[in-house]
């Protein structure tokens, strides 16, 4: 995925600091998934390590760029989910990974320039790892750059956030998002963008992976349950089989649409028996359920409790 138009302001701001020799030692790139934070991070890292960048952009043909493309640049470190001893991928970034990173950054650059480390997703750092990272942030080595990427920056300790230069990626205006979707070959950009809550990156992906069909199915399920035509356990089973968190997102959207119709005195598309206040309360419950699906609770029980309240 190439650079997105809404990156321009952040990019210009960062490159202006580079030209002044005033780059911070740590960046926090944050905001909703789908806005290209990782594209931005990779673009910046490649430009920073390039031997002969132009306007902050990597040249693409120097030795440094070749090593980056091969994933073997000695001054580039990437920290993400590691593997446990049994070979299973971890669900968090642990303290040993951060200690290894700190030891690596304490060494001299092999190319005599920057050493750059990305931590992604930074909001997956556990408490011990965050504490270890804090020491590195407080005493950074010269010519080192930490780039933290987080979809949920509020999960990071304030002590970490306050020691990073924050670049927050926000949803672009609808016209800009639709124009970009058109350049990406998305045919029904408006419907995709509505489904994605105005997020063009998600809209592009969802237009291609069957998510819009799942959204329509969720609305049919809710309408059937409201009309007494559906079996709650059957719906729970199907939702759990594929993208349950996304389906709950779509369900929350549907409840919000129904609430807006109620407020306007119009019949809702789902014919729910809930009033406007009840719909907003169910919407909030759906969002809590979506968050709980990330944790250890049984997904079937969480969905059953949510859908049992829908009528």
Image (cartoon, helix red, strand yellow):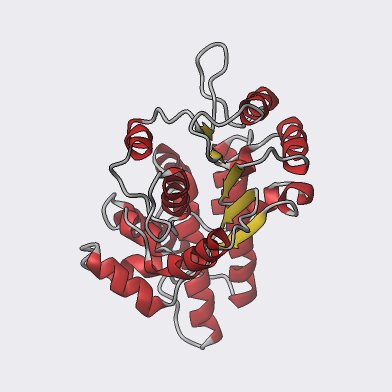
Where in the figure is residue 175, as x and y percent of width and height?
Answer: 36, 79
Please state the horizontal and vertical placement of residue 260, each as a whole percent of the image: 52, 80
Above-or-below relation of 91 to 184: above
Horizontal and vertical percent for residue 158?
A: 77, 51
Against 41, is 282 above or below? below
Which residue is at the front of the view, 111 or 246?
111
The residue shown at (40%, 44%) is 51
Q: Picture coordinates of residue 134 (x, y %)?
A: 76, 39
Residue 187 located left or right of residue 263: left
> Which of the 4 quarters of the picture holds residue 223?
bottom left
On the picture, is 138 further left or further right than 107? right
Quadrant of the image occupied by residue 141: top right
| Residue 190 visible in the shown view | no
Q: Is residue 45 visible?
A: yes
In terms of depth relative to the viewer, which is nearer, 279 or 26?
26
The one of 111 and 83 positioned closer to us in this rendering: 111
Q: Residue at x 70, y 34 (%)?
A: 126
* 36 over 96 or under it: above or below: below
Q: Residue furthest bottom?
A: 265
Q: Outermost residue, top direction?
A: 86
**Observer-nearest of 201 and 27:** 27
Above or below, 34 against 49 in this view is: below
């Amino acid at each position: 995925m190439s650079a997105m138009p809404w990156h321009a302001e952040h990019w210009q701001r960062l490159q202006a600091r580079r030209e002044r020799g005033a780059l911070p030692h740590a960046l926090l790139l944050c905001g909703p998934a789908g806005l290209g934070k990782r594209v931005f991070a990779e673009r910046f890292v490649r430009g920073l390590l390039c031997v002969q960048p132009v306007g902050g952009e990597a040249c693409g043909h120097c030795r440094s760029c070749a090593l980056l493309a091969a994933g073997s640049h000695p001054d580039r470190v990437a920290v993400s989910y590691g593997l446990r001893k049994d070979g299973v991928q971890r669900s968090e970034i642990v303290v040993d990974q951060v200690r290894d990173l700190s030891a690596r950054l304490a060494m001299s650059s092999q190319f005599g320039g920057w050493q750059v480390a990305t931590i992604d997703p930074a909001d997956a750092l556990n408490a011990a790892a965050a504490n270890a990272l804090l020491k590195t942030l407080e005493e950074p080595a010269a010519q080192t750059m930490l780039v933290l990427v987080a979809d949920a920056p509020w999960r990071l300790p304030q002590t970490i956030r306050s020691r990073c230069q924050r670049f927050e990626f926000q949803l672009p205006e609808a016209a800009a998002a639709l124009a970009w979707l058109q350049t990406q070959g998305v045919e029904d950009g408006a419907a995709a963008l509505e489904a994605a809550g105005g997020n063009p990156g998600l809209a592009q992906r969802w237009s291609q992976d069957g998510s819009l069909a799942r959204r329509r199915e969720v609305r049919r399920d809710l309408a059937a349950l409201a009309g007494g035509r559906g079996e709650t356990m059957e719906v729970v089973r199907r939702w759990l089989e594929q993208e349950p968190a996304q389906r709950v997102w779509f369900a929350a959207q549907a409840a919000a649409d129904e609430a807006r119709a109620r407020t306007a005195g119009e019949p809702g598309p789902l014919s729910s028996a809930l009033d406007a206040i009840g719909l907003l309360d169910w919407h909030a419950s759906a969002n809590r359920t979506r968050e709980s699906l990330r944790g250890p609770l049984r997904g079937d029980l969480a969905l059953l409790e949510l859908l049992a309240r829908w009528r």
